[in-house]
């Protein structure tokens, strides 16, 4: 389907981006870096939907529609997470996860 690029190369790229996101989410102590890692995970999933759909069923648009839903959910998740992070920063003047443990209930 895509000239000069095989499905294996694209899936290798998206798998790499996915695991970079997982690694970043697990190892980062900053809430913003964790949010960016979640975005990498969601974007690699959206690209996988589009690529697999284009290679298996080029006439259908199911993968495109699923990826649009993923992008919409990611936008809502980002807006909500940023609002939470901004409120936490106003309360404790930090966005590090270790400082969240010291918050009083």
Image: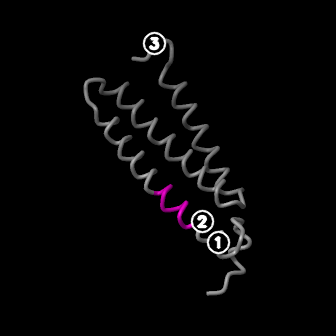
Residue toward you, 56 or 51: 51
**Disc 3 designates what residue?**
3
> Closer to the observer: label 1 or label 3?
1
Q: CA distance from mark 3 to mark 2?
A: 45 Å
Q: Residue furthest front?
A: 90
Q: Residues within 10 Å of mark 2 (few under 14, many from 20)?
A: some
Q: Position of residue 87 (x, y in %)?
A: 58, 70
The answer to the question of whether label 1 and label 3 lie on touching residues, with beta carbons closer than 8 A, is no
**On screen, 49 above or below 74?**
above
Task: Specify the quadrant that holds the N terminus.
Answer: top left
First in sequence, mark 3 or 2: give its number.
3
Q: Can you say whether 38 is above or below 43 in the image?
A: below
Counting from the top left corner in percent of width and height, residue 101 is at: 70, 77
From the image, tell me which residue sits under label 2.
86
- Asked if the residues shown at circle 2 and circle 1 are in contact, with their CB atoms under 8 angstroms apart, the answer is yes
Q: Where does the magenta region start and end?
A: 77-85
Left-right relation of 63 to 8: left
Q: Secondary structure at mark 3?
A: loop
In the image, 56: left or right of 22?
left
| Residue 94 place in picture, x, y as percent | 72, 68
What is the spatial separation of the Cα atoms under label 2 and label 1, in whole angstroms? 6 Å
| Image quadrant containing the C terminus | bottom right
Tag 1, which secondary structure?
Answer: helix
Closest to the observer, 69 or 94:
94
**Mark number displayed over residue 90:** 1
């Amino acid at each position: 389907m895509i000239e000069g690029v095989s499905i294996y190369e694209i899936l290798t790229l998206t798998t790499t981006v996915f695991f970079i996101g997982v690694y970043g989410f697990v190892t980062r102590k900053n809430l913003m870096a964790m949010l960016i890692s979640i975005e990498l995970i969601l974007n690699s999933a959206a690209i996988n939907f589009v690529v697999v759909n284009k290679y298996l069923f080029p006439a259908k648009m199911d993968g495109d529609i699923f990826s649009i839903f993923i992008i919409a959910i990611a936008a809502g998740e980002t807006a909500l997470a940023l609002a939470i992070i901004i409120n936490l920063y106003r309360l404790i003047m930090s966005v590090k996860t270790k400082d969240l443990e010291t918050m009083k209930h």
